[in-house]
Image (tube, coloured by chain):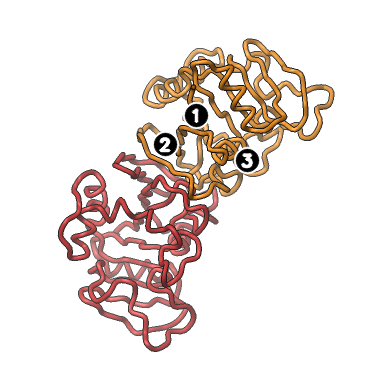
Chain colours: A red, B orange
Amino acid sequence: MGKVKCQISISADGYLAGPNQSEEHPLGEGGEALHEWAFRTRFFQEMHGREGGEGGVSDAVVREAAAGSGAVVMGRNMFGPVRGSWTEPLWDGWWGDDPPFRVPVFVLTHHEREPLTLGETTFHFVTDGIERAVELAREAAGDGHVSIGGGGEAIQETIRAGLLDEILVNQVPVILGGGTRLLDGIPPSVKLEQTRVVEAPGVAHLFYSLS
Amino acid sequence: MGKVKCQISISADGYLAGPNQSEEHPLGEGGEALHEWAFRTRFFQEMHGREGGEGGVSDAVVREAAAGSGAVVMGRNMFGPVRGSWTEPLWDGWWGDDPPFRVPVFVLTHHEREPLTLGETTFHFVTDGIERAVELAREAAGDGHVSIGGGGEAIQETIRAGLLDEILVNQVPVILGGGTRLLDGIPPSVKLEQTRVVEAPGVAHLFYSLS
């Protein structure tokens, strides 16, 4: 069965998104600074159908992390800013007509909705919780791994349910001063093993396995 | 003028000490786990006048970080568990008859006290705040650098006062679930530059300069 993996960028003070997330600031105030290193990679530009970007250490890290991903699970906040029931016009996600996932995406929500296909990506809406979402994602992923896309709550639920096998923390030298912390509410009984550390310009890639 | 440096071990969830610090648990509950990598180094054993310990990457890192330290500044909690006025019998610190510092140590406190010499270390008690403590430590350090020993509040005060030049964060793969966070209350206006990342067994050494 495929592994369940996550990669996430966090600030020096532990936040994966800045304060006051909104439609205007989907990553929270200042949160874009967490991803500048990733935006610079050739892989990121390719995923968004663009030319350019840089090769190098971080490009290799994100390329390797994404390789073999067969399905994605994400929280509803990562799908869009809408809260409560789905209302017309239906929100189609943050990513435009051709979302960069190109594998089945399972969105955690309390509100049922028909699947949505955009470009090569189909979003499925799961109302039965994280265990069911991961189960469906594993089936869809086949031999591939399942990627937990975020946000913080979805990652934390996956860890607390004992379902996350590996996490890649991209430690970024920026202070956000507030927002959503990656590991809030995770008990000390969760054991991490450091499996690899990679230095790259402006970011440290820290690999852990969980048990 | 010598630089002001700090090295500190933190958990994956950002804590430099566990919850419920006390005389029984000076590092907070579970906090010892943050320092197991350091206890294993030959340098740590030498500092405490003992044989043994391991060479290797972390040994070299802590040896290099300590080299040229001419004075130490620490918060009162790092000196001892006593709060309020000094009362008899006077607390002599956590470190026994021969504290491992062997340079002048400046202890931040609100309560005056005569200097205390133990072995090769003299503790000076500073009641005028962090700026004055760092000024005195710089004078005492001569060409050496000033080490901010901790705890969290002393480090945070030093950063907020714009006095910290470099920080070495030893990122340990353990979850504490509570305690004192390294960078709480530090505003985003504080800029970090990642200068070096070193992989070692069971710990990632992350070097930053501040401005």
Dot 3 and dot 2 within a common chain: yes
Looking at the rendered structure, the secondary structure element under dot 3 is: loop
Instruction: Report which residue position mark 3 lands on.
Output: B29
Furthest residue toward bottom:
A88
Residue in view at x 24 percent, y 76 percent: A97
What chain letter is assigned to the residue under label 1?
Answer: B
Q: Residue at x 50, y 59 (%)?
A: A179
Viewer-side label of 3, 2:
2
Circle 1/circle 3 CB separation < 8 Å:
no
Give how far apart the Cα atoms at labels 3 and 2 are: 28 Å
x then y, percent, for residue B167: 47, 34
Task: Tell which circle, 1 or 2, labels the residue nearer the N-terminal end.
Answer: 1
Left or right: residue B108 versus residue A157 is right
Q: Which residue is mark 2?
A: B208
Callouts 3 and 2 close, C-beta under 8 Å: no
- Identify which residue, A50 or A141, lies in the foreground: A50
Q: Amino acid at mark 1?
A: Lys
* Residue at the image position 63 percent from the left and 39 percent from the top: B28
**Nearer-N-terminus badge (1/3):** 1
**Quarter in which the C terminus of chain B is drawn:** top left
- Residue furthest to the left in view is A51
Residue B155 higher or lower than A110, as above or below: above
